[in-house]
Image (spheres, coloured by chain):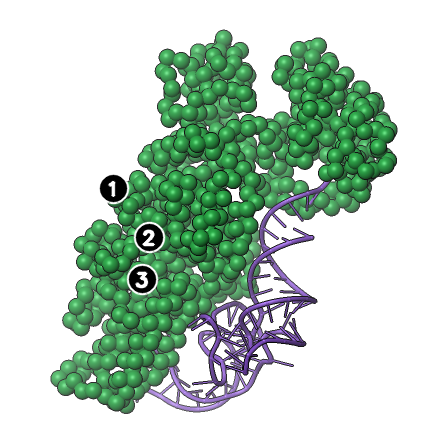
Chain colours: A green, B purple
RNA sequence: GAGCUUGUAGCUCAGUUGGUUAGAGCGCUUCGUUGACAUCGAAGAGGUCAGAGGUUCGAGUCCUCUCAAGCUCACCA
């Protein structure tokens, strides 16, 4: 044996040893032999990394924690499965791909959806093997033969079938509401995917005839329908129910004054403009007061009536548009025809022009330029989110969250991680319906079909055979283009809220002209079913054998995105929660406790650390003294210290082997401290086992480290030199420590074990599939 | 506005159902070590466990309040 343990030389070889024995697969011979049929199965579904992501410390963290639990369970004799996978990560991936297109001077609008999908598929395929290869480098003992990707055909079929089931059960419905729309990303987001940032902006006090209102968004005034005031506010009581008139920027404006106690009389002037299609509060107001407002809007008695009148005359307005409130901003973030001369200008730029014109017309009372308020931002690209009306599919969450809450109250679930059980419950009690439609290509397309004869008002855009982009209503376009040309070049489709549709995996009738919905599912809609559908689409008995899974281990920051939704969907689909325990780990921070980020330049690459100090050192540094739910700082010194631990283990083994070889003829003799030694060793086994059973992984690692170094090495080995402890006991101790350490530092322990095998000092051919010490 | 979490050695953090003298790594001081390991060992300095009160035979651990830091959600016309 070398004087120092050389991690780099051994790791690959050892991983191959395990793979050759098929030791990750619960069905393999080695594992069947190890299995204790009295114990329940033990399974973990690996959080699927984004197929496009290179590995970072976050991955290293979950791989290490899960691998520890899995290796421990396997050695204990559970029927053990760790099922790996990858996620297509819809918006994330399409966003990265579009950036790449932009660099090449191209845009997604140049391609029809089939071509775009294929291009992204190829791009992802290039990178997706990297994550698998790197996970293996970290020692992950996952069963790669059961690997699943969210866009695998069988997985997609399950997601589609479950969508149909939910439609039938009345758990999914289509509704036309305001959504969080990012004009830059070109898609809507759920409430969980937007950020609120405080910004210094301006609050404009605009003169609406006799009433002055305060607003931050003057560019939306063209879509106003009413003014809201507080019912008790004496200043405005004489106007309740009245229609006020004044000369606005683009002619005559008529607005109805309505009392509603959502208005704060202390704020601004106590009067608010109501713009239903550009603000969530105003939309809710519109729904509350629709009876009072709708017919007046339809008869063009509210809003910028002159402007609308001229649009009607010029036949620029469809019947449907006349009947509902105006829309001032479109999905590209530009102003619409309802804004007259400002049409086609981007919202923020138009705001400046409009404010200037309002000032010239003396329609601004004052401007407060020091107004601090929260602006909603796209979590992906940080653009301003535009609340826009769009028909979307929603999951009705109340029945699902209720069922989960009942299970939690019945103690069917334990959450490990600083207070996150309470946070989970809070979310389940307050969750709003979930918008699952996304206007992107990279994802699972909704199995929803529109017959174009029944739905002449479908608004579509497609690439024609001359590679030109064409946009319009299907009823008009079908006169000029063949159905086939439209369908094959289709980019996007927007169906009105009253559209008739059929839910079916394939086109419902080949003889009719059906177009498929172009929206794709929110990535989390498929991931929320992950534990169920990965097991259902694997080996025949996997679902019965491994569901519900034992532990869901993941970072706390995706508790609500993923874990909560898996609970809801898993319970709905199978009548059982998808896991019994949740273990949430924290973020890994740098030595100063700062978040790692590319811009700060403090990102640690786990593979570089692995090369420098060994994968075992990396793994041990990540978990030792870590606590569920709390962040952990790691510095270079920590990796070094753990490298030293591995070397210490190596040298302890080397010493014991040297002694045994030297005195190979010596008689077996009981020494003075042998009995005490055995007792203490037993205590360590039971402490570490208990820690691991209770998911106290950081504590288990700390216990092992201290007992091995300061008791076994500093005391026992020294005592054996004084002839107080026998060699047999030391060897026994080494074997026990190798087993206890193996889940944490699998490579160095297995390497030492292989040396013991060669010296015929142990019976089991592999440490990985040897039984856990009895306690 | 509401909720959650954290506060222990110079730094980063453990501390298991409340139970001897509160631990580890790194750093610091002194000494040692040519036969396991300098990737080492021995000895040591360094802690009013944020503060105050309470429960208890006994509190770093449980309860209440205060202070400080961080995170999340909601509102913001």
* Mark 2 / mark 1, whichever is N-terminal: 2
State the SS at label 2. strand
Would residue A554 be found to the left or right of residue A727 on screen? Answer: right
Mark 2 → mark 3, Cα distance in angstroms:
12 Å
Q: Residue A427, percent across and down?
A: 54, 48
Residue depicted at 47% across the width and 64% down the height: A627
Q: Are marks 2 and 3 in contact (CB under 8 Å)?
A: no
State the SS at label 3. helix
Residue depicted at 27% across the width and 80% down the height: A678
What chain is tagged by disc 2?
A: A
Dot 3 corresponds to which residue? A72
Would residue A393 be found to the left or right of residue B63 on screen? Answer: left
Instruction: Kindly indicate whether the residues beneath marks 3 and 1 are on one polypeptide chain.
Output: yes
Would residue A253 be found to the left or right of residue A743 on screen? Answer: right
* Visible residue check, residue A449: yes
Residue depicted at 80% across the width and 40% down the height: A265
Q: Quadrant of residue B41?
A: bottom left
* Visible residue check, residue A88: no
* Mark 3 / mark 1, whichever is N-terminal: 3
């Amino acid at each position: 044996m070398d004087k120092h343990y050389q991690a780099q030389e051994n790791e690959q070889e050892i991983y191959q040893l395990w793979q050759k024995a098929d030791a990750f697969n619960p069905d393999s011979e080695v594992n069947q032999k190890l299995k204790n049929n009295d114990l329940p199965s033990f399974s973990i579904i690996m959080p699927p990394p984004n197929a496009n992501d290179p590995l970072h410390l976050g991955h290293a963290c979950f791989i290490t924690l899960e691998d520890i639990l899995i290796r421990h369970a396997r050695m204990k004799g559970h029927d053990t499965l760790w099922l790996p996978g990858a996620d297509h990560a819809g918006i994330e991936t399409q966003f990265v791909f579009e950036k790449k297109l932009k660099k090449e001077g191209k845009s997604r609008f140049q391609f029809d959806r089939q071509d775009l999908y294929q291009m992204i598929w190829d791009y992802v395929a290039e990178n997706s093997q990297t994550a698998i290869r790197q996970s293996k480098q970290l020692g992950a003992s996952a069963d790669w033969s059961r690997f699943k990707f969210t866009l695998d055909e069988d997985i997609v079929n399950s997601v589609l079938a479950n969508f149909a089931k939910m439609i039938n059960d009345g758990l999914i419905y289509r509704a036309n509401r305001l959504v969080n729309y990012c004009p830059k990303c070109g898609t809507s987001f759920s409430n969980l995917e937007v950020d609120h940032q405080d910004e210094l902006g301006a609050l404009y006090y605009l003169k609406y005839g006799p009433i002055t209102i305060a607003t931050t968004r003057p560019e939306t005034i063209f879509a106003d329908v009413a003014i809201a005031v507080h019912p008790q506010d004496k200043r405005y009581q004489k106007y309740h129910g009245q229609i006020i008139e004044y000369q606005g920027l683009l002619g005559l404006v008529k607005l109805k004054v309505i009392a509603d106690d959502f208005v704060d009389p202390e704020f601004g002037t106590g009067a608010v403009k109501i713009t239903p299609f550009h603000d969530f509060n105003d939309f809710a107001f519109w729904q509350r007061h629709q009876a009072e407002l709708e017919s007046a809007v339809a008869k063009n008695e509210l809003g910028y009536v002159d402007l609308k009148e001229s649009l009607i005359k010029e036949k620029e307005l469809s019947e449907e548009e006349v009947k509902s409130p105006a829309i001032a901003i479109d999905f590209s973030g530009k102003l619409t025809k309802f804004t007259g001369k400002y049409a086609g200008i981007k919202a923020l730029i138009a705001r400046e022009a409009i404010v200037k014109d309002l000032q010239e017309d003396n329609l601004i009372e004052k401007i407060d330029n020091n107004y601090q308020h929260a602006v909603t931002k796209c979590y992906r690209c940080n653009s301003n989110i535009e609340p826009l009306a769009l028909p979307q599919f929603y999951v009705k969450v109340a029945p699902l969250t209720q069922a989960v809450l009942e299970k939690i109250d019945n103690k069917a679930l334990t959450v490990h991680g600083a207070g996150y059980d309470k946070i989970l419950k809070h979310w389940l009690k307050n969750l709003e319906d979930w918008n699952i439609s996304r206007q992107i290509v990279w994802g699972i397309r909704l199995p929803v079909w529109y017959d174009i004869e029944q739905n002449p008002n479908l608004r579509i855009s497609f690439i024609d055979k001359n590679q030109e982009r064409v946009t319009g209503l299907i009823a008009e376009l079908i006169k000029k283009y063949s159905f086939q040309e439209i369908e094959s070049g289709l980019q996007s489709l927007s169906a009105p809220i009253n559209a008739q549709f059929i839910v079916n995996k394939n086109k419902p009738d080949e003889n009719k002209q059906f177009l498929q919905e172009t929206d794709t599912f929110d990535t989390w809609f498929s991931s929320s079913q992950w534990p169920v559908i990965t097991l259902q689409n694997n080996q025949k008995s996997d679902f019965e054998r491994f569901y519900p899974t034992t532990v869901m281990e993941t970072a706390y920051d995706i508790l609500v995105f993923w874990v909560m939704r898996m609970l809801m969907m898993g319970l709905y689909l199978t009548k059982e929660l998808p896991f019994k325990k949740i273990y949430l780990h924290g973020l890994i921070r740098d030595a100063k406790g700062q978040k790692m980020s590319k811009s700060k330049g403090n990102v640690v690459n786990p593979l570089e650390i692995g090369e420098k100090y060994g994968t075992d050192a990396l793994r041990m540094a990540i978990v030792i003294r870590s606590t569920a739910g709390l962040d952990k700082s790691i510095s270079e010194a920590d990796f070094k210290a753990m490298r030293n631990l591995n070397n210490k283990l190596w040298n302890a083994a080397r010493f014991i082997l040297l002694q045994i070889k030297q005195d190979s003829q010596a008689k077996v003799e009981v020494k003075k401290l042998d009995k005490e030694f055995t007792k203490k060793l037993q205590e360590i086994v039971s402490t570490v086992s208990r820690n691991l059973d209770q998911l106290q992984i950081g504590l288990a690692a700390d216990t092992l480290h201290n007992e091995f170094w300061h008791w076994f090495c500093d005391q026992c080995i020294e005592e054996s030199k004084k002839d107080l402890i026998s060699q047999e006991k030391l060897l026994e101790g080494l074997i026990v420590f190798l087993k206890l350490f193996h889940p944490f530092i699998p490579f160095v322990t297995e390497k030492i074990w292989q040396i013991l095998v060669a010296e015929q000092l142990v019976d089991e051919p592999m440490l990985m599939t040897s039984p856990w010490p009895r306690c």
